[in-house]
Image: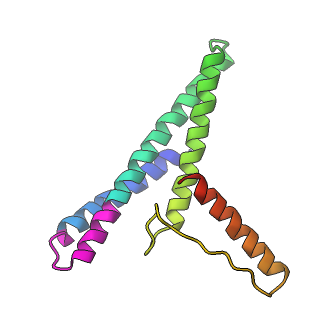
């Protein structure tokens, strides 16, 4: 499962960000200090979200195992379904947040789609960009 490995990697990343933040926090440049704090906050949010994902995945797995031995009613099935949807949504958000590192804030990223004159390849690229934008808007 991807969640435990991701939690470990993001936890290591958060620890590194925290140590960098301690060193650079009192830097004379306010912009650099602010960027360090934003990166640390993002790392903490990702770690917390991945822990929630791991918990929900384990919950859905447990309910599925109980269903196999006929100990689950309809309400627990709904709960497992909702947990699996939450896990899917968190994992999609995690993958998108990995693509949005850099000068753009993950919460305020903006994308402009322009059509080119190159034919089929251009149309496919625009279709991919449009689907990425639609996926991104689902999480905002």
Residue 95 at x, y = what percent? Answer: 55, 58
| Residue 18 falls left or right of residue 2 | left
At 39% from the left edge and 50% from the top edge, which residue is drawn? 47
At 22% from the left edge and 75% from the top edge, which residue is drawn? 30
Residue 74 at x, y = what percent? Answer: 66, 16
At 59% from the left edge and 71% from the top edge, which residue is drawn? 111
The total of numbered circles placed on residues is: 0
Q: In which quarter of the image is residue 122?
A: bottom right
Residue 126 can be seen in this image: yes
At 25% from the left edge and 68% from the top edge, which residue is drawn? 20
Residue 66 at x, y = what percent? Answer: 61, 18
Q: Quadrant of residue 105?
A: bottom left
| Residue 90 falls left or right of residue 15 | right
Residue 65 can be seen in this image: no
Is residue 2 on the magenta stretch? no
Is residue 57 placed above or below 135 in the rendered structure? above
| Residue 124 falls left or right of residue 23 | right
Q: For the N terminus, which image quadrant?
A: top right
* 16 or 111, nearer to the observer: 111
Judged from this view, the residue extending furthest toward the right is: 120
Is residue 34 on the magenta stretch? yes
Is residue 30 placed above or below 72 in the rendered structure? below
| Residue 87 falls left or right of residue 67 | left
How would you classify the magenta stretch by its main secondary structure? helix
Q: Give the range drawn in magenta.
A: 23-40
Residue 88 at x, y = what percent? Answer: 60, 44
Q: In which quarter of the image is residue 12?
A: bottom left
């Amino acid at each position: 499962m991807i969640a435990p490995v991701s939690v470990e990697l993001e936890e290591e990343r958060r620890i590194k960000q925290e140590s960098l933040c301690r060193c650079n926090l009192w830097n004379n440049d306010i912009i650099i200090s602010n960027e360090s704090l934003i990166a640390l906050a993002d790392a903490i949010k990702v770690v917390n979200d991945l822990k929630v994902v791991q918990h929900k995945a384990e919950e859905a797995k447990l309910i599925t195992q109980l269903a196999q031995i006929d100990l689950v009613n309809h309400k627990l099935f709904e709960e497992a379904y909702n947990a699996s949807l939450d896990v899917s949504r968190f994992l999609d958000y995690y993958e998108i947040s990995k693509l949005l590192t850099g000068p753009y804030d993950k919460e305020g990223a903006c994308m402009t789609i322009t059509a080119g004159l190159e034919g089929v390849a251009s149309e496919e690229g625009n279709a991919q960009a449009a689907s990425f934008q639609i996926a991104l808007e689902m999480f905002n």
